[in-house]
Image (cartoon, rainbow, N blue to C red):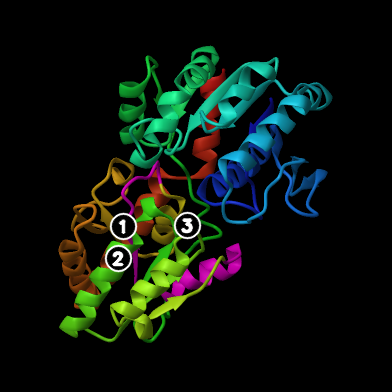
Amino acid sequence: MNIALLNYEYPPVGGGAANAIYFMARAFARLGHKAVVVTAGYQQIQGRAEEEGVVVYRVPAARRNKDRATLVEMATFVASAGVRLKTIVADEGVECVIIFFALPCGVLGPLSGVPYVVSLRGGDVPGHMSQVKALHWMLTPFRRWALRKAKAVVANSDGLRRTAERADPIKASVIPNGVDTDSFFPRAMRYEKFIFLFVGRFSEEKDLATLMRATARVKGAAASDFELWLVGDGPQLPELKRLARQLEVDACVRWHGWSDKESLRELYQQARCFINPSRCEGMSNAVLEAMACGLPVIASDIPGHEGLVERGKNGWVFPAGDESALSKCMRAAAGSQERVEQMGRDARILVEKKFSWNETANAYIELIG
């Protein structure tokens, strides 16, 4: 089958959804299908290319930052892709399109001229992120139009499915994200200090301010010799650096910026425990990658973490936004190396059994029919 995957960002640009489409496209190719990615161009990275068995079209768009896109920049991609999509579909013999995000990309589905599936990721679902509530309300007719005409609607977690079905008159299937366990794997030797690790965009919904305040509590309790490594970038970076100085934790916080896959794997492998304090997620690729590298996870109790982090088995769960509860989890992790290692082994076993990109790709193929 010839399948197009459409999203406004794709490596080397973007975050979790960009990585998901990268690995999914390659899984389709491994399974004998033709995978075509339609995404936004960035700086000098433009046009058609063949990359590791995947055809990639990067159409013109006004994107300025590697790690994030504004609504206006997303709209320029939608406009540009809308002009070119039908031609790309015809030239590549595409039989079905998988569209990431109901908004802004979902409206391109009816323009493709072939059946399409909408893959919900989180921020595109009303009720998932409160800060875009008004925008979702204004765009309801466009979102529902795109969802109604889709062959199928997919959420990447059961929690996201429930939220989507409350918001719109649809039925959604659940196909979880996968993780490349060949690329992300444990290493016996860890960094000499106890390293807590976060990977993601520095934005409001990730709630890194709560993580900073929890880190100050752990430092104040002198639980152990530890560091907090933050990998990524985003609009809250200056504010978070100021907060780290105010809380006097800047000496134990290391800022890594965005990392390529190989460098990121090494950071996972050096860490002892992964933390995701997010207030909303669809299903976090970073959590899956950390677990594949043998890390237990401290996670907020949000729907997107359901089925990934089991309290006391492969990590700890705390009420989202509760810095006191988060600090207790961090102290528990730092205070028991043997327990952390066993939880990390259990985390790796879980992703090996339940989460692979081949399984994700096969589930989409079965759904497409």
Q: Identify the disc placed on residue 277.
A: 1
The earlier-in-sequence mark between 2 and 1 is 2
Instruction: Tally the numbered discs.
Output: 3
Decide which of tag 3 and tag 2 comes sooner along the chain.
3
- Kindly identify which residue carries mark 3: 201
What kind of residue is marked 2?
Answer: Leu
Which label sits on residue 288? none
Label pair 2/1, CB-CB below 8 angstroms: yes
Cα–Cα gap, marks 2 and 1: 7 Å
In what quadrant of the picture does the C terminus appear? top right
Q: Which mark is residue 211?
A: 2
Question: Which part of the image, by quadrant, shows the N terminus?
Answer: top right
Magenta span:
259-283
User: Relative to residue 30, is residue 83 drawn left or right?
Assistant: right
On the image, the x and y values in percent for residue 145 come to: 52, 15
For the residue labelled by badge 3, is the local secondary structure a helix, a strand or a loop? Answer: loop
